[in-house]
Image: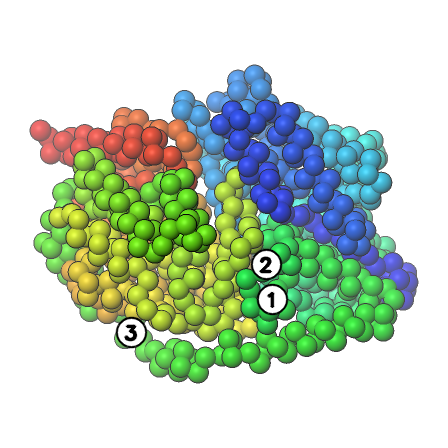
Amino acid sequence: MTAKSAAAAARATVYGYPRQGQNRELKKAIEGYWKGKVTADALKETARTLRRSHWQQLADAGIHEVPTGDFSYYDHVLDTSVMVGAVPDRHRAAVAADALDGYFAMARGTQDVAPLEMTKWFDTNYHYLVPELGPDTVFTADSTKQVTELTEALALGLTARPVLVGPLTYLLLSKPAPGVAADFEPLTLLDRLLPVYAEVLADLRAAGADWVQLDEPALVQDRTPAELNAAARAYRDLGALADRPKLLVASYFDRLGDALPVLAKAPVDGLALDFTDAAAANLDALAAVGGLPGKRLVAGVVNGRNIWINDLEKSLSTLGTLLGLADRVDVAASCSLLHVPLDAAVERDIDPQIARWLAFAKQKTAELVTLARGLSQGTDTIAAELAANRADLASRANSAITHDPAVRARAAAVTEADGRRSAPYAERTTAQRAHLGLPLLPTTTIGSFPQTNELRTARADLRAGRIDAAGYNDRIAAEIRDVLGFQEKAGIDVLVHGEPERNDMVQYFAEQLTGYLATQHGWVQSYGTRYVRPPVLAGDISRPEPMTVRWTSYAQSQTDRPVKGMLTGPVTMLAWSFVRDDQPLGETARQVALALRDEVHDLEAAGTSVIQVDEPALRETLPLRAADHAAYLAWATEAFRLTTGGVQDRTQIHTHMCYAEFGDIVQAIDDLDADVISLEAARSHMQVARELAAHGYPREAGPGVYDIHSPRVPSADEAAALLRKGLEAIPAERLWVNPDCGLKTRGWPETRASLENLVAAARTVRTELSGS
């Protein structure tokens, strides 16, 4: 096919769409079902209605081929485990008794059965449920969900393309099941898994699928020759199937590297590749392998992970270069639009100047349709759109919001000394232990306590004018006193004020920093029914006044025990925001770090002896390619040290990380030079403690003994058993006892019981260590 005919065939598509609905209808229906207030039939009808609405929105916008199968009640990787029959033994009875309840048991656990482990989906803030596999795993096909959703879309008269997690990515994201040797490689199950995929593909073909998309984002990571050979074998076998739909293999989040020639040679019908900035090398690599003659190329030229408008002319230039490299070139976002909010048009409180710069899922679909039309019919047909886009881009580039001379001068003046503590850890810890007087195995929590309906009502009452600021502050003070009273009674050693005044650990700070803006409806799924509204980091950052000193100091005035000051670190402030893309991330991180540094020093001056700077996103933001790690970790660790540098030796600096794989960043954790780190460890059975020990980590650590992402209450014996595992790796004088993460999403009854059991476990193990 000539470049001209390839252009004429160009159409717009997407890989996935936000699941929740404009008003988070899915979240409300699922949580209602969990509470017994919504029936299973009503929940399923809500899901069907949302799917139809989303597909119709896409079709009405001009999207030619809508995705099916990307919708999920909880997580698409969990859906894949169900599709291939990889249900853990401990959940089989629940699944057999009721498929929906068993599904949620795998996701959330029950009081008697632990859930699947949860971790981050590549370098995003979306969490997936980790499949558990072993040498005895038997896969069986269940294509019910995929066929049902395809049938629904086809019944609406739409062109639909089922989207599945590919077999390589599914296995590479899996872990050995409990009781299976740690060195078991799930990829060894590939030949056992491929026939199941073949059966699902045949079912989809029989149901009317012309194309099926197999997502293989794991192939953008560094892969061994054996793994690349497995990819070649997998798609050789699937491509050779006689009764199958056309296969579109998709990758995203980064460049494919050595996997690109493997997939280009595979007997599949098309590739979907990321051509945004992070993966620009895909273009040259595709040309180097001779393109995709006779195949379809779906070009991801619109960023599916951020909310800034696309540079239409730049994308058209990339698309024009791709013409002639494939039989057909279609236009798409770089990845599923799951990672962005639904509609920027409903935001009423954003400065109109800034609103011009934003594109959520609906706006991105419009960009895709515009690009496809311009590619197919010529730029004259989209002249008005191109002119408006140029004006909007210029507005952003020239705005005073994005350039504050004072902020830039301060950042430029930073020296290496600004990021150092005055004494090494060995000296600091002596001063801290003398000052704080804590027992062996000190207990603490991560920061937040349950956000009750009363607290949400108080915030709503304040916004609506039903109470004034004084009335609201009285409610917050009362909640802080209650939280402190519970912690003292329970016997916790280092207290927190519970963060009742905070809506979100990033948004709370963003609302008090210049350069940030908040949305009202910009909800994005983090995991399950947990949705967040990432703030928008639009310009240069500074801190006009203290943000946390008032309530931290108030809490400390109510107790003789130390109260931690709680801050969100600079990397997480970037990672959990929609960060500006018009300057290097390291420069933005330095600005945020300097603003937080002012807060740390003000907390210390107010008498706060323990300050926690949370960096749960440090690992998730790690680039997917090892060649890019060093540069990222250099600016990321510098930003943390800049935040915490300059405090007194006796001021104990904590940090916290959760729900990611930490083994490959232990040196970076060491380089942070924090005095204490708390980490998620309950679901992974203290894996991170062993990783710290293997590295020779010299500071204090609190691997979590209470999984807060499940409603189940761990017994004191269970927590003690995990604590003993931690002691196998970390000496008692350096081991803390804490939950995995904050308690904001939990209810008070389970929180009270779980923390009381945590303290009881610590006391039991202290007694064992003392021999009395």
- In this view, the residue in front, 643 or 753, is 753
Q: Is residue 386 above or below residue 718?
A: below
Q: Could you tell me which residue is drawn at 50 percent across and 60 percent down?
A: 518
Q: Residue 347 carries which label?
A: 2
Q: Which amino acid does label 2 sit on?
A: Glu
* Distance from Cα at disc 3 to Cα at disc 1: 37 Å
Left or right: 268 in relation to 409: right
Label 3 neighbour load within 10 Å: few <14, some 14-19, many 20+: some
Residue under pointer 3: 418
Quadrant in the picture for residue 582: bottom right
Left or right: 654 in relation to 394: left
- In this view, the residue in front, 304 or 382, is 382
State if disc 3 and disc 2 touch (CB < 8 Å).
no
Q: Which mark is residue 415?
A: none
* Distance from Cα at disc 2 to Cα at disc 3: 40 Å
Q: Could you tell me which residue is drawn at 18 percent across and 35 percent down?
A: 489
Q: Which of marks 1 and 2 is nearer the N terminus?
A: 2
Residue under pointer 1: 355
Total tally of numbered discs in the picture: 3
Q: What element carries label 3?
A: helix
Q: Is residue 485 above or below residue 557?
A: above
- In this view, the residue in front, 175 or 701, is 701
- Given this view, does label 2 or label 3 mark the residue nearer the observer? 2
Q: What residue type is labelled 1?
A: Ala
Q: In which quarter of the image is the C terminus?
A: top left
Q: Could you tell me which residue is drawn at 26 percent across and 59 percent down?
A: 550
In this rendering, does residue 376 appear at all?
yes
